[in-house]
Amino acid sequence: MASRTVLPQTTLPLPGATAPQSLAASPAGALAAPRHGLFEDAQALFTGSLFVGLTMMMFAQAGLLTGSTAGLAFVLHYATGWPFGAIFFALNLPFYWFAWQRIGRAFTVKTFVSVGVLSLIAELGPRLIHIDYLHPAFAAVAGGLLMGTGVLFMARHKSSLGGATIVSLYLQDCYGIRAGKVQMAIDCSVVLLALWVVPWPRVAWSVLAAVVMGVFLAVSHRPGRYQAG
């Protein structure tokens, strides 16, 4: 009796993955995409967290907001004066359960590390760098691009910043809905909810930052373009 090879199942397909097809449909000699090593993951997650941390410092300096759990953390920070890093870390705790159940352990651990590093950078950063003047328009555009780049680094190394990012990546990988579009919709909604605590001109600049980030992700994070694990 011929033996049958059983392929391991994965909890979540790679971005752009389609329904399983026969091996005959694959190009002859096709090789599996190379996986990232531990050092590659570490440098990407740290760099992504650093980029987003710089964005958080820019937004705090300019009085802007962002979306997802980070936006809620900013609202609570502005309203109560509590440390942003601690609030952000605490708000993400419930999303780890969803990520563990729906996406996988590796993704959850990497996300936990990314959120922890970002929270630490947000707390220590103001002691290491200070900006005397920052126009909200520059903070919105540059911050949106920096945050989008950081989120892209994390997504390509199977990590995220928790919150809505987990949900948006899950919807893209499972249902083909662009993560950038989902992220933009959620971020803009959260920012608009902040009208009661932040002056409307700052909210308008914050919406611009969310749009810049969402467009960047929609253009740069397309399914099928990046298959390394």
Image (spheres, grey):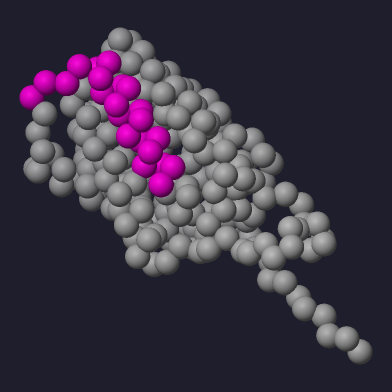
The magenta stretch is: 132-153
The x, y position of residue 159, in whole percent, is 45, 52
User: In the image, what residue occupies the spot 72% across and 49% down?
Assistant: 18
- In the rendered view, tell whether residue 196 sits above or below residue 128: above
Q: Quadrant of residue 79?
A: top left
- Please name the residue shown 9% across and 33% down the image: 130
In the displayed structure image, the side of residue 169 where residue 61 appears, left or right: left
Q: x%, y% of residue 44?
A: 36, 53
Which picture quadrant has residue 187?
top left
Residue 199: where, in percent of width, then height?
Answer: 28, 12
Q: Is residue 24 left or right of residue 27?
A: right
Residue 219 seen in the figure: yes
Membership of 137 in magenta stretch:
yes
Q: Residue furthest bottom?
A: 1
Closest to the observer, 29 or 152 = 29
Question: Where residue 120 appears, x then y in whole percent?
Answer: 23, 50
The quadrant in which the N terminus is found is bottom right
Q: Is residue 126 above or below residue 93?
A: above
All told, the count of numbered labels is 0
Magenta segment, prevailing SS (helix, strand or loop): helix
* Residue at image location 21% in from the left, 22% down from the top: 62
Question: Is residue 228 in the magenta section?
Answer: no
Does residue 72 appear in the picture of this structure?
no
Residue closest to the far front: 28
Q: Tell me what residue is drawn at x 57 percent, y 60 percent.
A: 33
Residue lying at the far right in this picture: please name it: 1
Left or right, residue 92 beside residue 223: left
